[in-house]
Image (tube, coloured by chain):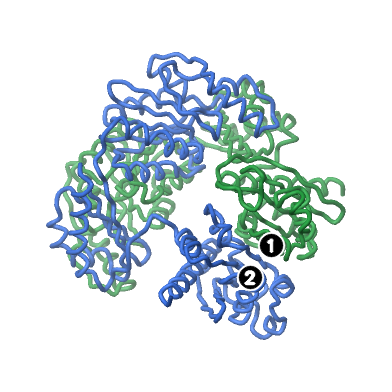
Chain colours: A blue, B green
């Protein structure tokens, strides 16, 4: 039982957008035992779309088509699918109502004829109601195969997949159990690692695949297993990992979780009833933004002060002018004052701060581009560390943010252990 | 003259990584007039790779294959390409030297047999030396078609493409001139926009394609033209834009020069010597984060207060408790106080604020999920607007952020016009 993804849109082929939909689909489908055989990205071109669907139908039982469902002339997916199925378009009343509702609720613009046409669907299609947009999802079947057409807007597509497509697929087909387990290793090259575990790898059962994913000083080892029975898969993966671990003890650092570190921090803080505030300079709000992207953040996150200008650090976070003059604004003293005072200002358990120079030019400080101080304040203590994250702005902001989360998580876990 | 991209690796199909290589290739190739016909992502599986190359060869003259060139067992691209060309592997001395150099320079690990095998290449391949890694790029030709195999590591692939592949392709083929010009519009839905410019769109010459790219409250209009002569393309695009602009004057905000609205705002503020501070609630630091992603932001951006908790709004931004009780924390009164007081706090020309409910649960307010107030304060005035951005957290944050930028840019431009 395999699936194929077809993503439609010139913007993908000219590189105007990165196709993140396919990665989402791959991950979600794998959770439920649905393998993706191929991902194909094609232009908004009728002949090409028809050919792609035809080829996908040869290889797969489930064909997921995203994109090209907008109301404007360049979007031709619906008409093309209609042609593929020798079908004709009919108006779906429920979709029309949904379109009207979306317009009356969210749009100041009048409902145009072209918007109403969003309610036209192939007569043999089952509608997957899209409550987040005007283009409905469509589910068609032929010779036991399923064709699903979804809008390309990521949040519309995601909601349709998790709420409607996957439940419907699971009701229709029986999927095997797929499990991926990824081990993080640091400090050994992929070929040295491969040589060391060669014997183990050669004796893996056929239904387990091993992949080496090297990236900037670390190698991820991914074990993938697929079988009809969940228990078989889980037992065998566990057995193989138990055989592997003693051989890589010195370089193994943990398993790769699906969850971001800020989500993990959120769970920990919620569970312990602890709170957090952040004071950001060089990270410019990125830490707060990532924390608040998680639903329920208001339980543990009280807020942030982004003191980009030095005078704001002095005025709002009571950084001392003398420290700024003596040590510069990128310094241990300033970072620690920021963390301490933001914790007091928001009255939280943890305060975390960043001050650094993200480049490309030196800012209010003489510190070398890439220098970042990160401080953590708790009720009992304040400490900080300094890093150099190189000279690409995006990289400095990203790495400073990750490092701040890493330090915070260590601190929370420490506290946790003590209790 | 068309190209196809084949990306190889299970990690793409299971969604463990997002395929950013394809977007890079699409963008780079388009710059030089090379259209991408299709992008195909396939598993590390011999039969599947062979089939994908065969199909690509039917459609395209240039086939770019990335990934699967590592030294470990799971990477089989090189052997598969060798089979496709009925060729055999031979050791390339220069590649071997490169591998040895990389190991002696960057690696503490000994050079293993498996690393030396990176120097084996199909006998008919031209080597594209990879100075950033041990897997060489390979260039093969058959029946006038070009096949290029490249490592999947993004920075290795990118260097090979820009430094070697594109120059070699341009020496071998003559490409037409391709031009994309993208206009940013805010505040009018894609269908309303399409209706307004329908007549213009219907009279576009056949070699110009128009696409509507809607995203979180804004619509990008992309014009794409392709012709043998650069001057023809440039002249026609200019002519069409001159016809279009008067019709979209009220919603047009600028061209996308790979430039975001926050970057445009940054230029405008810098030029006028004006400054900005933000007070964010539901956007959680996202506005500040996007502003500070731009180099030079410290010239015009003084900082932000992310008052996620109601008590922080009261304490730091002096929101009145009575307003919170009477109007709720998601209200015109609270938004306007936040904007006014953050402007005073940071002593800036503009203050902008957001307060809303991003969901999924109602927070400190009874406002419906998706409700967001956005306020702008200047020296002379304060005003605000209310929106409902739906009930998906990611969408509410994204649309509120974009709308705040849109309102701010209109305000800055207004000021500009008056002068």
Give me the disc on residue B311.
Answer: 1
Q: Position of residue A329 (x, y in %)?
A: 65, 77
Q: Position of residue A29 (x, y in %)?
A: 34, 41
Q: Secondary structure at mark 2?
A: loop
- Nearer-the-camera pick, B271 or B11: B11
Distance (Cα) linking label 1 and label 2? 10 Å
Q: Position of residue B51 (x, y in %)?
A: 25, 35
Give me the disc on residue A347.
Answer: 2
Location of residue A326 with respect to B387 vertically, above or below: below
Location of residue A408 with respect to B27 vertically, above or below: below
- Nearer-the-camera pick, A71 or A256: A256
Q: Position of residue A396 (x, y in %)?
A: 53, 66
Location of residue A259 with respect to A364 vertically, above or below: above
The residue positioned 71% from the left and 64% from the top of the image is B302
The residue positioned 45% from the left and 18% from the top of the image is A122
Instruction: Confirm or deny contact between disc 1 and disc 2 (CB under 8 A).
Output: yes
Q: How many marks?
A: 2
Give me the disc on residue A398.
Answer: none
Residue A171 in which image quadrant: top left
| Image mark 1: chain | B
């Amino acid at each position: 039982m395999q699936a194929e993804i077809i993503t439609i849109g010139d913007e993908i082929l000219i590189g105007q957008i990165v196709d993140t939909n396919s990665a989402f689909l791959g991950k979600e489908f794998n959770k439920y035992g649905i393998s993706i055989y191929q991902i194909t990205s094609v232009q908004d071109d009728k002949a090409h779309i028809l050919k792609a669907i035809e080829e996908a139908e040869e290889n797969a039982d489930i064909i997921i088509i995203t994109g090209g469902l907008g109301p404007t002339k360049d979007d031709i997916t619906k008409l093309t699918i209609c042609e593929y199925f020798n079908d004709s378009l009919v108006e779906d009343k429920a979709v029309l109502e949904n379109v009207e509702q979306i317009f009356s609720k969210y749009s100041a613009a009048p409902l145009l004829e072209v918007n109403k046409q969003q309610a036209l669907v192939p007569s043999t299609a089952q509608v997957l109601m899209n409550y987040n947009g005007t283009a409905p999802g469509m589910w068609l079947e032929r010779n036991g195969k399923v064709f699903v057409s979804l809008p390309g807007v990521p949040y519309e597509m995601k909601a349709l997949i998790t709420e409607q497509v996957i439940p419907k697929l699971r009701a229709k087909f029986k999927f095997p159990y797929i499990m991926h387990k990824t081990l993080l290793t640091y400090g050994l090259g992929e070929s040295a690692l491969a040589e060391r575990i060669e014997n183990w790898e050669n004796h893996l059962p056929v239904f387990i695949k091993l992949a080496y994913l090297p990236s900037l000083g670390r190698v991820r080892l991914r074990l993938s297993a697929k079988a009809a029975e969940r228990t078989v898969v889980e037992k065998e993966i566990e057995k193989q990992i138990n055989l592997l671990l003693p051989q890589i003890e010195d370089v193994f650092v943990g398993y790769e979780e699906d969850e971001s570190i800020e989500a993990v921090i959120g769970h920990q803080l919620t569970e312990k009833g602890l709170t957090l505030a952040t004071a950001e300079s060089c990270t410019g709000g990125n830490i707060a933004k990532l924390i608040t992207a998680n639903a329920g953040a208001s339980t543990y996150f009280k807020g942030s002060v982004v003191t980009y200008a030095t005078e704001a650090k002095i005025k709002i976070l009571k950084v001392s002018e003398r420290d700024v003059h003596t040590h510069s604004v990128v310094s241990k003293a300033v970072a620690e004052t920021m963390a301490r005072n933001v914790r007091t200002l928001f009255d939280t358990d943890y305060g975390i701060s960043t001050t650094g120079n993200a480049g490309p030019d030196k800012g209010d400080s003489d510190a070398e581009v890439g220098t970042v101080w990160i401080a953590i304040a708790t009720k009992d203590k304040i400490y900080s560390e300094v890093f150099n994250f190189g000279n690409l702005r995006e990289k400095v902001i990203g790495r400073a943010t990750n490092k701040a989360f890493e330090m915070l998580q260590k601190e929370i876990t420490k506290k946790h252990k003590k209790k």
